[in-house]
Image (cartoon, grey):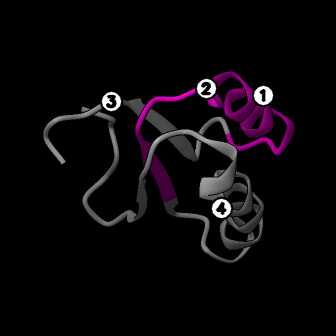
Amino acid sequence: ELGIGDGTLLVGMVAILRFKKGHLDLLDAAVEVTRALPDVRFVLAGNGPQRENLERAIAERGLQQRVHLLGLRRDI
């Protein structure tokens, strides 16, 4: 569905998109992790009031090809 290869390391987070959940901390860590592990992807499942802020933060960190916002999922 996401076009992620079989050998790709996948890091996931399932949580409502609220500031206190720490999504921005994960994105800051993702910057460092992707430097060391070029074949890693991050998936964030959930919806919430911070979605637009997270989309902006992903773009500011240059993580558009590494982070997938899945929205609300019922198939976790």
Residue where numbered disc 3 is placed: 72
Residue where numbered disc 2 is placed: 49
Q: Nearer the viewer, mark 4 or mark 2?
A: 2
Name the element at disc 4. helix
Pick whichever of labels 4 and 2 is earlier in the sequence: 4
Name the element at disc 1. helix
Residue where numbered disc 4 is placed: 26
Asked whether 36 falls inside the magenta stretch, the response is no
Check if mark 4's residue and mark 3's residue have beta carbons within 8 Å.
Answer: no
Check if mark 4's residue and mark 1's residue have beta carbons within 8 Å.
Answer: no
Pick whichever of labels 2 and 1 is earlier in the sequence: 2
Residue where numbered disc 1 is placed: 56
Check if mark 2's residue and mark 3's residue have beta carbons within 8 Å.
Answer: no
Residue nearest the viewer, comparing 72 with 65: 72
Disc 4 to disc 3, C-alpha distance: 18 Å
Q: Quadrant of residue 60?
A: top right
Pick whichever of labels 4 and 3 is earlier in the sequence: 4
Does residue 48 sit above or below 15 in this rendering?
Answer: above
* Farthest-out residue, bottom: 36
**Amino acid type, label 2:** Pro
The percent coordinates of residue 69 (x first, y second) are 48, 34
Disc 4 to disc 1, C-alpha distance: 14 Å
**Amino acid type, label 1:** Arg
Disc 2 to disc 3, C-alpha distance: 12 Å
Pick whichever of labels 2 and 3 is earlier in the sequence: 2
Q: Residue visible at 67% across and 54% down?
A: 20
* Farthest-out residue, left: 75
Determine crowd level at label 3: few under 14, some 14-19, many 20+ residues with C-alpha closer than 10 A: some
Where are the magenta residues, as a range? 41-63
Disc 4 to disc 2, C-alpha distance: 17 Å
Question: Going by the image, does 18 lie left or right of 15?
Answer: right
Q: Residue visible at 41% across and 59% down?
A: 12
